[in-house]
Amino acid sequence: MNKNTLQIFQIDAFTSEVFKGNPACVMPLEQWLPDDILLNIAKENNVSETAFFIKKDDHFYLRWFTPEIEMDLCGHATLATAYCLKNHLNFKNDSVKFDSMSGELIVKYKGDYLQMDFPHRKPKKSELPQNIMDSLSIKPSEILKSRDYVLVYENEDQIKNIQIDKELFDKKNIDPGGVVITSLGDHADFVSRYFVPQCSFFEDPVTGSTHCSLVPYWSERLKKNKLKSIQLSERGGEMICEDVGNRVLIDGKAVTYSDGYVHLKY
């Protein structure tokens, strides 16, 4: 394979069925390409995140790009990368370690599940930008913030039925974060949805990184460490999570949608 031909895998994360969960493209590299090329590849792939990685001694360095920006952390694309290594690239270990902009990330292989070891980002009370508040058809009962704004609601019906005025919502760029809405769940400990202003993907199907904040919040409120989470997007996804003090463990499944090659000329 020449240097301008790259492998590409599209993986649906946080699901065991294609067409569900959150799709991510995963692309192994021998060395880093220029950032503008990585961004253009992510734009061309046109999924919410593309993960690029290179081997580094006994571990890997991992980066995530949306079609607009490089992200500091992405859960579903990390899960997809670990799944790709084990199922397509002959990785034999019981766990994989990634270096990233968010520090060291470890994913363990546990049967059909992959368990991600992620940062603990307990959200704190905050105020919401007025344009975002005005865009919400249902107002939250509590406003918190870590990387993302965390808006707490009274029940699952509010999470399902909320309407967001995208024109108002998009007036303020809050990169690299977004807005996660959450409540107690009817069939899980909690449910959520995630929206990003000025992004080509307004609602993210399933978002692992928001659980760095959601799990500490709900663990404290429900007085339990192990939690089941459902994301109520159209595609939907499920996670089993655990608050272990200074880290958050997130378990999920993944499945391959496609694999192939990208041929670059630049």
Image (cartoon, rainbow, N blue to C red):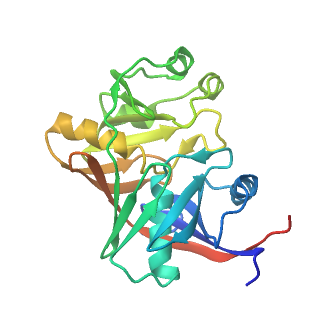
- Residue 183 x %, y %: 31, 35
- How many numbered marks appear? 0
Q: Is residue 261 left or right of residue 14?
A: right
- Considering only vertical position in the picture, is 101 above or below 153? below
What residue do we see at 75% from left, 76% from top?
3
Q: Residue furthest left?
A: 223
Is residue 149 shown to the viewer in this render? yes
Q: Quadrant of the C terminus?
A: bottom right
- Considering only vertical position in the picture, is 75 above or below 260? above
Q: Is residue 120 left or right of residue 205?
A: left
Q: Residue furthest front?
A: 57
- Residue 190 x %, y %: 29, 42
Q: Quadrant of the N terminus?
A: bottom right
- Residue 117 x %, y %: 33, 57
What residue do we see at 63% from left, 56% from top?
47
What residue do we see at 36% from left, 62% from top?
106
**Image quadrant assignment for residue 153:** top left
**Image quadrant assignment for residue 142:** top left
Identify which residue, 173 or 29, lies in the foreground: 29
Q: Is residue 127 left or right of residue 202?
A: left
- Considering only vertical position in the picture, is 73 above or below 105? above
What residue do we see at 42% from left, 20% from top?
139
Identify which residue, 33 or 13, lies in the foreground: 33
- Residue 225 x %, y %: 17, 48
Identify which residue, 69 or 182, lies in the foreground: 69
Q: Residue furthest right?
A: 266
Is residue 17 shown to the viewer in this render? no
